Image: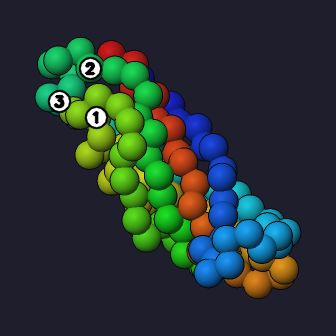
Amino acid sequence: MIFGSLTISAQENSSKPNENKLLDAGLPISMPLPPYPKKAESERAGGAVEVQVTINEKGKVIAANAISGHPSLRSAAEKAALKAKFTRTLSEGKPVKATAVLVYNFLP
């Protein structure tokens, strides 16, 4: 069994890191679940896999990197994360790139 969750920590990619701007964080439109990899199943691997994603100005995930979790589960989680879609993240009413962490929980 696999289930997913989302921790939004959207941040504008700004050249001025200390600039305070109001961000309207994008919300998930779709967050497909990964298949349970056969290798992981045979190893009875399970647990949470955190995937940091970069979301472009249109809400499309353009990069996904697993930052924690069992090695046999990471690739499947990254591939699923690349298929996720979000509403646009806005800063002062303008679309911006953002980051978020998706968490996929694999239960053996």
Q: Earlier in the sequence, mark 1 or mark 3?
A: 3
Between marks 2 and 3, how big is the CA–CA gap? 10 Å
Location of the N terminus by quadrant is top left
Number of numbered markers: 3
Instruction: Write the residue at 58% across / 54% down.
Output: 100
Quadrant placement of the C terminus: top left
Q: Is residue 92 left or right of residue 53?
A: right
Pinpoint residue 80: horizontal percent, then vertical percent: 39, 51
**In this figure, which residue is indicated by the disc labeled 1?**
73
Q: What SS does tag 3 mark?
A: helix
Please give the label number shown on residue 38. Answer: 3
Nearer the camera: disc 1 or disc 3: 1
Contact flag, marks 2 and 3 (Cβ < 8 Å):
no
| Residue marked by disc 2 | 45
In the rendered view, tell whether residue 100 sits above or below residue 35: below
Residue 61 at what x, y percent from top left? 48, 66
- Amino acid carrying label 2: it is Ala
Q: Marks 2 and 1, how far apart in space?
A: 8 Å
